[in-house]
Amino acid sequence: MTSAALHADRRRRSRVVAVALTSVLAGGLVIAATPAYAAPMPAEPTFQDGLSQAVFTKVASEWINEEAWVESEVDSDRDGKPDLVHIDVTRVPETASGLKVPVLMEMSPYYAGGTEVTNWGVDHEIGAPPTEKEPWPAFTPTNRTSPRISGSLENTWVPRGFAVVHAEGLGSGWSEGCPTSGGLNESLAGKAVIDWLNGRATAYTGTDRATEVSADWTTGRVGMIGTSYNGTLPIGVASTGVEGLEAIVPVSAISSWYNYYRSDGAVRAPGGYQGEDLDVLADYVYTRFDQEICQPVIDDLRANQDRATGDSSPFWDERDYLADAEKITAATLVAHGLNDWNVMTKNASDLYEALKANGVPHQIYLHQGGHGGNPNDTLLNRWFTRYLYDVENGVEQLPKAYIVREDRTLTEYPEWPDPAMEQVKLKFSPAAAADGVGGLAVSRDGSRATENLIDDASIRATALAAAETSPNRLAYRTGVLGEPVRLSGTPSVSLKLSVDRTKANLTALLVEYPATGAPKIITRGWTDVENRSSSAVTEPITPGTAYGYEFGFEPKDYVFSAGSRIGVVIMSSDFEYTVRPAPGTELTLQPSASTVHLPLVGGMEALQASLRAAG
C-alpha cells in the first residue's frame, strides 16, 4: 500500500472508530477494559460531529520538538545567499512511526521581541514632513528563540493530530533576510516553509547549511493562523498561490499596507500609533543578530514610503496582496473586531469581497472588540478539520457570516454584508442657525446656502461630534428613529466643498446620537483634498474653487437604536489619525450638493418605517 493510500485508510478507519464509539455509548453498553497485558494502541486522528478530537498525548514532554532553517528563494539582505527562515516543529510521537499529519503554522516577526523605536512627528504642515526622527537605543538581542520559538497553538492542536510550525519573519530572531513591512520577500519566505513541508524546498539543521532535514512526517496540507502582522503573513503567503496552503484564518490582518498607513492620499496612522510607518515597523521587528546588514533595505523603505504626498505607488502596490487575489485558493475564515482602529475593517472587508468574487471557500467572524479576537474554538476546529483533514463536515453549507452583536450574542447570517442590505442616499441640508446642526433626509429643503468650518487639529473628533455648536465642524442628523436600523457594509460620502488654501485634510464621521448620553462615533473616513480622483495622483487645487470629493468610511456592521439619530460630522484634520497642521484652514461646504450613502438592511423602506414609527 502506498503512503498516500495508507494515510487515506487511517483517515477512514479513524472516522469509523469515532462513529462506532458514539453509537455504543448511546446504546448504554459497557465497553470492556483493555487487558493489562495489552500494549497501548498508537493514537490515530479521530473526528466526531465533524470536529477533530484530542486523542493524542497532551503531555508536552512526549511531543517531538525540532528546529530547522528553510532556504527561501529570496536574498533580501543582499549577501549573495538565499535567506534562511528559522522554524520550529512540534508533533506527536506517532509521526516517528509512519503517521502523517497536517500542519498549523504561525509566522511572526515578533517572537524575538522588538526595538524601542521612535515614530515620525505629525505636527507639521501637510506635504512638509520632518526629514529626521529622534534617535533610539541600539537593539541588543536578548530573546534567543532557539531551539524553541514559541508554544502558541500547541496545547490546542497537537493533541488533535496537527503538527505546529512556528516561523520567524525575515530579519527577526534567528531568521536571515530583512524585514520590509509586507514586501514580497516576506510572503516568499512563508511560501518556502510550505514548499519544504511538501518536499519542494531544502531545510538545514543549522545556519551552516551542512546537514539537510526533511519533513517526511506531514501530509503537506498546511493551515496558517495569526493576529495582526501574524495574520497578515497568511494573506501574503496565500497570494503567492503556493500549493499546499489549504486554509488560512487571518485575524485583524492587513490585506493592503497602503490601507494600513494611508487613506485616499492622506497620511493616516493606525489608531494608537500616530507617526508610525513602514520604516518604523521594520526597525521595530529587526531583531536578528546582525544589526548592520539590513540598514540599506530599511533606508529604502524610508525613501519610498512618501510621507509628503501620501500617494499610492508601485512601491505600495507590492504590499497590496489583493492585487494577486486570483492566486488565493486557500479556504479563508476572516476574523476582525468591528471596533479595531489599529488594523481597520477595510482590510477585512476588501479581502472578503475578493474571496467571494473568486469563488474561494470563505466565512467571516466579526465581533464587538478591538484589535485581535479569534473565532470560537468550534468555528476554528470545523474549518481546519474540513480543509486540512478533508473531513466532509458540511462547513460549506453553513452560514457564511458570524457576528457578535451589540448584546454579545453570536448571530449567524447567510452572508456579509447582509444580502438584504441596500444603499440609502440621504441629502444634507444646512443648519437653521450658524454653527448649529443641519438635516439629513431623503429630500433637500432647496437651500443653496454654504457652511464653513475652520480646521483645528488640536480638538479631538469625539469632542467635535458631541458639540452642539462649533466653528470647527459641520454636523447633520436624521430625525429620531422609532425602531432599530441595522447598517451592514461600507458607508460613503459625496461632498462638494472648497478650501481657502492649497492643502487640507478632509475627515467624515458617522455618528449615533442617542436619546440620552454621549454620541458614539461609529466609523470614520479620510481623504486628501489633492487626491480627489485617485489615491495615486496628486492634483493641485485652486483656493476658493469647489470640487467634488467621494470617499468611504471604514466598513461596519452596527445597529442604530430606537430613539437615536444618525449623524454625519464633517471636519478637517483628525487629531488621532492624520497629520496635524497649524489651525486656520477654512473649508466651505455646499450641503445642497452633498450626500451620504448608508448600507442599511431593508434599505430605504426600513429607514422610513423607523422614522415614521417615531411619530
Image: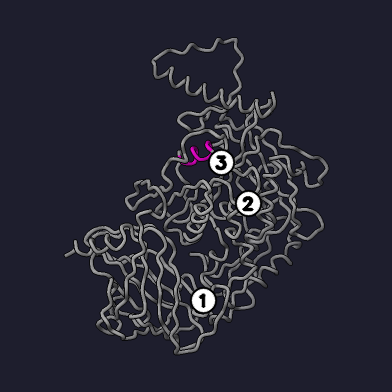
* Disc 2 to disc 3, C-alpha distance: 19 Å
- Looking at the image, which is closer to me, 417 or 46? 417
Rendered image quadrant of residue 615: bottom left
The disc, 2 or 3, on the residue closer to the chain's N-terminal end is 3
Q: Which amino acid, by three-letter code, is at mark 1?
A: Ser
Mark 2 vs mark 3: in front: 2
Residue 489, how many percent across, how many down?
A: 40, 59
Q: Is residue 380 magenta?
A: yes
**Residue marked by disc 3:** 153
- Looking at the image, which is closer to me, 604 or 76? 604
Locate residue 560 relative to residue 326 in the image: left or right.
left
Label 1 residue SS: loop
What crowding class fits label 3: few (fewer than 14 Cα within 10 Å), some (14-19), or many (20 or more)? some
* Disc 1 to disc 3, C-alpha distance: 45 Å
Q: Residue furthest left?
A: 615
Q: Which amino acid, by three-letter code, is at mark 3?
A: Leu
Mark 1 vs mark 2: in front: 1
Residue 465, how many percent across, how many down?
A: 34, 72
Label 3 residue SS: loop
Q: Which amino acid, by three-letter code, is at mark 2?
A: Val
Q: Which residues are magenta?
A: 379-386
Q: Is residue 38 above or below residue 185?
A: above
Residue 517, how many percent across, how many down?
A: 27, 65
Residue 547, how many percent across, how many down?
A: 45, 82
Q: Is residue 6 magenta?
A: no
The disc, 1 or 2, on the residue closer to the chain's N-terminal end is 2
**Residue marked by disc 2:** 237
The disc, 1 or 3, on the residue closer to the chain's N-terminal end is 3
What crowding class fits label 2: few (fewer than 14 Cα within 10 Å), some (14-19), or many (20 or more)? many
Find residue 533 and name its label.
1
